[in-house]
Every structure is written in structure tokens, then in C-alpha cells.
Amino acid sequence: MTVVEPEVFRAERRSRYSRQMALSMRERDRGSGVVGGVDAGRRGKAPAWILAVSEAQPGASAEFRSYPTFGQLWDYAKTKGLLVVAVDMPLGLPMASCRWRPCEERARGRLGKKRERAVFPSPPLCTLDAVEHAEADRLAVEAGGNTLSGDTYRLLEKCRDVREALDTAAFRSSARPRVAEVHAEVCFWEMNGKKPTHYTKRSERGQADRLSLLSSHFSGIDAAVEESADAPPDGALRRYDMFDAAAAAWTARRIASGDAERLGNDERDEGGFPMSIWI
């Protein structure tokens, strides 16, 4: 005897299936794909951009790559269709009269007195083409601002490299890859239960602490770091640069899943680059 299912039950079953499919698609979109985290570092004695690549889902492994220019790194990210690329570098730059961007002030507030010095002012936009420190100081002062510290001046070449490769479309939420600015120390602050790390990244204890935090989010990251740190023939990558890149990749996952927090408002610089830090 054939039992005919009442239409109301069939409709309910179809509705339940549709809800499950919609939930599955949302979860797939939140957790699938590949993200990247970027830090400016060195390979051997040469400047390099360090890219940590990982699947977007929590606990996935990571691998490290390096590129002499940000443009080459960006070409790779586009070719591979990365979802989000989180960059540990100032992207939107202030006018010369601004000592701190609002997002930097908020980042320093999160880190507290002990670690706030890990965040320093971004170079002003008016100095972007300066080729010497004295020239950058002159341009900044002429625009009504302050001279640049050594740390700030050393960012100029890297900021130029990034801005030559990117345009404002890369910051749209629909962009693939989507670019976002992060600060590694603030990433570790969030990863550490909203507490700053106790030791600097260059210290042995500081590196051990950062690796411990990352190991909770990336499977086999200790082996991946060791492999890249000892990779001939082009020279080794520095461990703390890889840790910063991995921390940026962790935040890239959070951006892709919609869980990240943005420090700063909708302010953009004169080139249309946003002045925000994501954690």
C-alpha cells in the first residue's frame, strides 16, 4: 500500500531543506577559500615581503612565501584568488599635520602603556616621494607637520611599493582579494585574550610566546616556520617576520568570516585609501 505524504509535510520538508542549504552556503562562504597575511621583512640580507597563506577555516596549516616587491606578491594573490590579504603596513596615510591617525591612537590604547610603543606614526602622504630623510622632514614641515622618526621614515619605501600595486577597488568588501590594514601586535593582543604580549618580538621569550599563540590557530606552524627559516639558497626568513605575517593571516580569516573589528572610522586619505586597522 502506497502512503501519500500530505502536502503540508512535503512543504515543511522542502522549507527545512532550504533553510539547511542556506545555512550550509553561509557557513561555506564564511569558512572556505584561502587568505593571506603580509609583513615586510627580509630574506637573508635582502628586503622582502613575507606572505603567510592559509585556508580560511580555523586550525588550517600555513605556508610562507616571500617576494622582493609587493606587486609580485599581489599578482600571486590575484592569480590564486585569495579572499582577503591583511597587510601589516600603513595603507591610508595622514596629512602632515596629523601626528597620529585615529586608528593608531585606538591601537595604542588597546596595547596599553607597556606595548603602545610598538605602534608608531605613519609617514604623511606629502612625503611619499622623498628619497632622503632630510627631504621627507622638509616636506613634512613645509606642510605644517613634524619631522619623521627613523622608524617612520623607513616605512616610506614600503608604503610606495604597496600603493603602486593597489587601487581603491581592492578595499571594497566585494573585492577578491580584499585588502585590509592590520597591526601584528594588535592581532596578538586579540589572540591573547585581549592582553598585550609581555616581551618584544625580537626576544627569544617573545618569539616563544607568539609561536605558542599561533599554534592554537595553525596546525603544524612550528614546522612550517623552521622550514622557511632554514630555506636555501635565497637566504632564511626571520622567524619574527613570519610570526607577524601569520598573525595578519589570522586576522584575515576573521575579516573573511565577518568576525573582525575595525579600529577607526570611514576616513580615507587623499588617494582614497582607508585609514583603518582591523583586528
Image (spheres, rainbow, N blue to C red):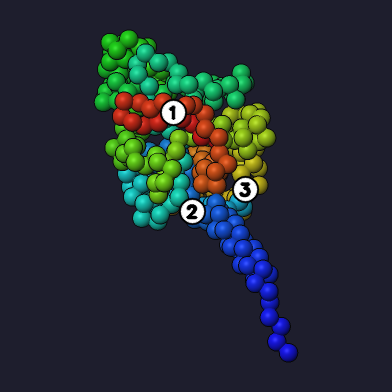
Secondary structure beneath label 3: loop
Q: Earlier in the sequence, mark 1 or mark 3?
A: 3
Residue 266, labelled with which disc?
Answer: 1
* Left or right: residue 184 compared with residue 123: right
Q: Amino acid at mark 2?
A: Val
Residue 217, labelled with which disc?
Answer: 3
Q: Amino acid at mark 1?
A: Asp
Q: Quadrant of the C terminus?
A: top right
What residue is rendered at 31% in x and 25% in y?
270
Furthest-bottom residue in view? 1
Secondary structure beneath label 2: strand
Cα separation, mark 2 vs mark 3, equals 15 Å
For residue 210, say whether it is visible.
yes
Tell whether label 3 touches label 2 (CB within 8 Å). no
Q: Nearer the viewer, residue 29 or 255?
A: 29
Q: Nearer the viewer, residue 107 or 120?
A: 107
Q: Earlier in the sequence, mark 2 or mark 3?
A: 2
Q: Which residue is mark 2?
A: 34
* Left or right: residue 198 compared with residue 187: right
Furthest-right residue in view? 1
